[in-house]
Image (cartoon, rainbow, N blue to C red):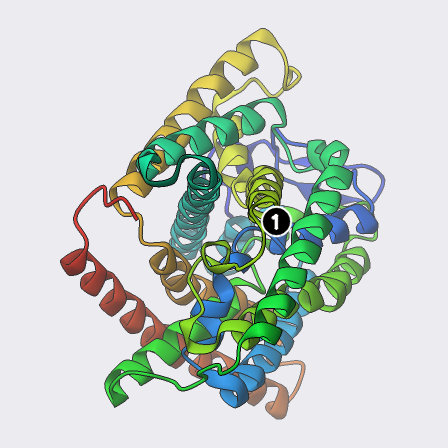
Amino acid sequence: MASSSLDTEAAQAHKAGDGGYTTAATAHAVDTDSWQQVGLLLVTGFNCAYVLSFSNLMMVPLGWWWGAACLLLVAGAAWYANWLLAGLHLVDGHRFIRYRDLMGYVFGTNMYYITWFLQFTTLLLGSMGFILLGGRALKAISAEFTGESTPRLQWFIAATGAVYFAFAYFVPTISAMRNWLATSAALTVTFDVALLAVLVKDGRSSKQTDYTIHGTQQEKVFNALGAVAAILVCNTSGLLPEIQSTLRKPSVSNMRRALALQYTVGAAAYYGISVAGYWAYGAAASEYLPNQLGGPRWASVLINATAFLQSIVSQHLFTVPIHEAMDTRLQRLDEGMFSRHNMARRLVARAVLFGVNVFVTALFPFMGDFVNLFGSFALFPLTFIFPSMIVLKIKGECDGRWHRLWHWGIIVVSSVLGVATTAAAVRLIVHNVSVYRFFADM
């Protein structure tokens, strides 16, 4: 097995506590959080503003029966895959706090960089999606009061990026988010309950709802593949080792407890919103549900405002691994996160990251594309393929023939689905680029 000591973050490895394992150096905190804290972080993180798009992205292309089947199947598969990956946190006396370090250790330098590329692509596209959703929420609030004179979407995208930047600067790590989890949970419950109430009202008042899957046969196939990718996005992040790194010992069983909380309480909430939105509006469900609500003005403002505020916290979970990589390389590890030198370096790093993300988001404001592309291109290998590859590499000869066939089956099926859903996502992007102009005010 090859070493993954490719840069500062891996070269300064040290023995962690009295457990005897080796942990790579990092500017961020590790081994500090309870499983309840991480479980709540996952529940609120996945019940973010993205759920306002999932009725359109997941249910409309699949319909009731295929939609329900795919929701359950993908959630179960993602739970199993993450449960498996959680068990690979400790290998050969090393605790791997980064996915790319684990892949580099087992398979060598090339897989280190492939994993780095897939993870950071996922996180960057996810961040752009959050910025776009935050901008849409602020514009919807403005439209309730200004009507047709509402400023362009790009202004709200810029404002969202500025708020996210400030939060990322002053709350630099995953562990530091603990002080914000109660607020995030309260905001999540508020916009979930308010949204469900309006959806039930609208659904009951609708005399006839169309649940037909529209489009040509080719369009139905490609849209269904995009829906499968979107379902994967709402269930997994591709950064489980980074989240697991913050957990206290025993990190494996604690991570699995946190995952159980996500895939029960968390999934019930984000699937509930998605199904309720489709039930209320059917094939006409908007890619941003608050634009379609028939409730009073105050309800729309409340839902958009709480969704925006909650996204400030939840988006940070999915960008922290990028911040950690930059902080570990740029900051002085022997000083605190809030030393003058480290704060200056962090200011520049966060400003560059969010500046680029805001510009690209304003340039291509196509919400569904972000979800489908990173769900297909990166999350299939990160969630399903790589964990099975690791198991085959380190345990393959010991666990028997059927065990090997099981994991090879996961690799083959996931590879085929990854290629197919990526093709569907690229097709959607090409279509939207031909329909919309740059900096479109959507």
Residue sitting farthest toward the left: 434
Which residue appears at 37% of the width and 54% of the height?
367
The three-letter code of the residue at mark 1 reads Ala
Splitting the image into 4 quarters, where does residue 320 fall? top right
Q: In the image, what residue occupies the spot 77% across and 62% down?
A: 261
Tell me: residue 193, above or below residue 393: above
Residue 375 place in picture, x, y as percent: 43, 64
User: How many marks are shown on the rendered structure?
Assistant: 1
**Residue 286, relative to residue 413: is it above or below?**
above
Q: Does residue 96 show up?
A: no
Q: Which residue is mark 1?
A: 299
Instruction: Look at the picture and state if 21 lies above or below 415.
Output: above
Q: Quadrant of residue 285?
A: bottom left
Q: Report the side of 151 relative to 80 (left or right).
A: left
**Position of residue 391 measured from the top left corner of the image (x, y, whole percent):** 60, 72
Q: Which residue appears at 68% of the width and 64% of the height? A: 269
Q: Position of residue 88 (x, y in %)?
A: 66, 61
Residue 187 can be seen, yes or no: yes
Q: Is residue 326 left or right of residue 29?
A: left
